[in-house]
Image (spheres, rainbow, N blue to C red):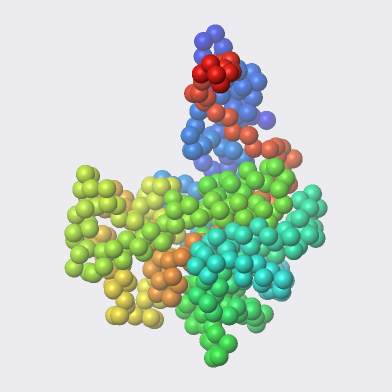
Amino acid sequence: MADKTAKLTFGDTELELPMYSPTVGPDVIDISKLYAQGKVFTFDPGFTSTAACDSTITYIDGGKGELLHRGYPIDQLAEKSHYLEVCYLLLYGDLPSAAELEEFESLVTNHTMIHEQMMFLFRGFRRDAHPMAIMNGVVGAMSAFYHDSTDIHDAHQREVASIRMIAKMPTIAAMAYKFTIGQPFVYPRNDLDYASNFLRMCFSVPCEDYQVNPILSRAMDRIFTLHADHEQNASTSTVRLASSSGANPFACIAAGIACLWGPAHGGANQACLEMLQEIGTVDRIPEYIARAKDKNDPFRLMGFGHRVYKNFDPRATVMKKSADEVLDLLGVENNPTLQVAKELEKQALADPYFAEKKLFPNVDFYSGIILNAMGFPTSMFTPIFALSRTVGWISQWKEMIADPKMKIGRPRQLYLGEPMRDYVDIEKR
């Protein structure tokens, strides 16, 4: 039942539209019957004022700098929890008991290997293929290998598909990386945690032993956690739209990966690092800060401010702590890019211009620094983002499939083309 109604008047028509109040956030006007009752559409490019679904998973208040997963603040989860526990929370709605978490972690760990025949898929790509292109193709192809988990109407198959994708995505991402640098694939190990396993698959080689540093593993786990879900963003909305057609889960997640690849979405930390490399040396920072302040200069400081968060990015505080720990461990003396990053952060935070405009370093600024310090090329930044976001996509997909109100997505349009006209034979044109 609607909590109240809103009146819409146009011409001689007056409609009463239902209004609903969420747990937190602004009220929502239900326009689902607007065309049926009033023969009009709404116009909302980018759907920035439209709620396309109801959800119980993630809530963002950009004005307050607030991000909640199932009601839990992201900073608490990143500080006190770890990625697989957050995965459980997103998937099932509550934090697990110790026994539930142990069972879930074991389940994920025992599904990290991929079908051996999938190895041939990687060899079909060019060596210089972008890792995101490889991930997109391989994840989409999973439906050709795992037929027993593609029936979206079977709750057990949905569960199996969910676990498989969370478990296998690090393996696929690491293999995509290894393939592009010409090194042999490294199989996952069941005695390592999720983040450590991924780092080992990326950086170990068969000819020597590799020990994962716990500081790096913790930083990697935080990157995964802080990117796990972000409400109805472009890639999540893509997954939901693809899912609404009844497509299999692997195809839907591949659609999300394709959307995330866009530089306006998943490429922010890569753009940030490329900006730091463009600045080049610490002595050039004042020049670039001056350019960022000049409204006539198209240059913008990447990694500062956020489209959603109008105050501060709640994920950035935790990520900064990880960045400081990683840089203290690995040092910045021989890395000009990281030297620029640390000094740029210092100068920008001390400048009243950025404080007044609330242009604080965001999660992409710090995650790019961490990944670069660890040794990842910029081409791997978005694949790691996709790996992290997989659980969010799956949680949103599962929620949508279970919704009895689900219907196929069908946005409308404001048509500005030619009206109806008659065909003219070619000799008369």
Task: Tell me: 357 left or right of 7.
Answer: left
- Extreme residue in the front direction: 427
Task: Residue 338: give x, y in percent of width and height.
Answer: 32, 72
- Quadrant the N terminus occupies: top right
Task: Tell me: 142 left or right of 199.
Answer: right
Task: Tell me: 239 left or right of 261.
Answer: right
In which image quadrant can residue 146 be found? bottom right
- Extreme residue in the bottom direction: 208
Task: Residue 115: give x, y in percent of width and height.
Answer: 72, 71
> Looking at the image, which is closer to me, 208 or 194?
208
Could you tell me how many numbered marks the image carries?
A: 0
> Looking at the image, which is closer to me, 259 or 37?
259
Above-or-below relation of 99 to 16: below
Task: Tell me: 83 left or right of 285.
Answer: right
Task: Residue 262: give x, y in percent of width and height.
Answer: 48, 52
In which image quadrant can residue 198 be found? bottom right
Residue found 55% across the figure and 60% down from its top: 133
